[in-house]
Amino acid sequence: MKKFMMRYLMINCKEATLLMAKKEEGKLSFKERMMLSIHTSMCSICRKFEQQTSKIALESKHIHGAGVLTPTAKEKIEKMLEEYSD
């Protein structure tokens, strides 16, 4: 039974990276989470890659949130664009 389960849940590195990308979107099924977990528990390279992609995703969300204009800045830019188009 153990061999069957391991064979059923084993994936290669390419499949693992695809699941990592899918994970960032929050769309992993239970089976996919198990497959990724088993793979990363045995593959240090994929484990490191998963850590790095998670950190990049977190930082990019932080940066994206900081890029929102204040209402004053938005008005100033709109006014400048209107003056430029005249």
Image: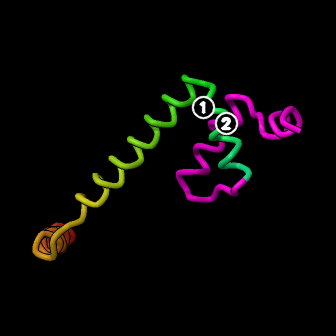
Instruction: State which quarter of the image contains the N terminus.
Output: top right
**Residue at 65 percent of width and 49 percent of height:** 33
Q: Which residue appears at 55% of the width and 23% of the height? A: 45
Q: Is residue 14 magenta?
A: yes
In the picture shown, does residue 86 fall above or below 7? below
Callout 1 touching callout 2 (CB < 8 Å): yes
The percent coordinates of residue 32 (x first, y second) are: 70, 49
Task: Classify 36 as above or below 43.
Answer: below
Question: Does residue 28 appear anywhere in the picture?
Answer: yes
Provide the residue span drawn in magenta: 1-30
Front residue (pair 61, 48):
48
Give the dominant element type of the magenta stretch: helix, strand or loop.
helix
Give the quarter of the image for residue 17: top right
Please say if 78 is above or below 41.
below
Foreground of the two, 46 or 9: 9
Q: Which residue is mark 1?
A: 41
Q: Nearer the viewer, residue 59 or 86?
A: 59
Which residue corresponds to mark 2?
38
